[in-house]
Image (tube, grey):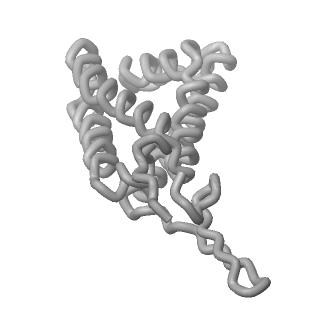
Amino acid sequence: MRRGWNKHGVLCRNLTFVTVAVRRRVPVPVRLTATGLFVIGVVLVLLSLTATGVMLSDMKVDPVRQHGTGYFDFVLFFNGVLCLLPLDGLVLVLGYRLLRGDHWAWWVTMLLCGFFVTVVPLLVLVLPAPLPFAVVPALLATSFAVLLCTPSAREWTASRADLPSSAG
């Protein structure tokens, strides 16, 4: 840890009986990524709750019988029955922990981005789904990975062992 910085990234200096605390600003790429993860997390939570409600209603609301698609049924099943609420929670926690500067959150977000870039397009190829269902998640995951690879984001989420110690 650098001299003068406390555990939470607050610069503390004692100026003649007055302690001044200045919080480091979160870099813009990290803020954009965290905001995107928050939005995706909220959308996934709403989809999970909707899917759970449809599944618990004994399929009184059946999209296929109402001239819908089988893909919507699959999304509801996958999201509701296979319990993606923990993944939704993980996405929200990752956004929060990235803002805090946790190194493990950076790694998990990068792994999650790699997973979505490879698996979602393959899943759309297997299922009869429209192309935007493959392109949009892959582009979002790629953009999050690019944002997190910027020097300011890497410095923000660097582990404490990677920080240069200042000689004082």
On screen, residue 160 versus residue 58, left or right, reads left
Number of disc labels: 0
On screen, residue 71 versus residue 85, left or right, reads left
| Residue 28 seen | yes
In which quarter of the view is residue 17 placed? Answer: bottom right
Q: Position of residue 105 (x, y in %)?
A: 49, 37
Q: Position of residue 129 (x, y in %)?
A: 27, 24
> Which residue shows up at 28% across the image and 17% down it?
123
> Which residue shows up at 53% across the image and 27% down it?
87
Looking at the picture, tell me which residue is in the foreground, 4 or 47.
4
Q: Position of residue 51 (x, y in %)?
A: 57, 25
Looking at the picture, tell me which residue is in the foreground, 131 or 12.
12
> Which residue shows up at 31% across the image and 39% down it?
141
Residue extending farthest to the bottom is: 16
Looking at the picture, tell me which residue is in the foreground, 20 or 106.
20
Looking at the picture, tell me which residue is in the foreground, 70 or 24.
24
| Residue 36 seen | no
Q: Position of residue 36 (x, y in %)?
A: 43, 50
- In this rendering, the answer to whether 59 lies above or below 39 is above
In which quarter of the view is residue 118 placed? Answer: top left
Residue extending farthest to the front is: 168
On screen, residue 130 versus residue 16, left or right, reads left
> Which residue shows up at 54% across the image and 51% down it?
1
- In this rendering, the answer to whether 17 lies above or below 159 is below
- In this rendering, the answer to whether 41 lies above or below 48 is below
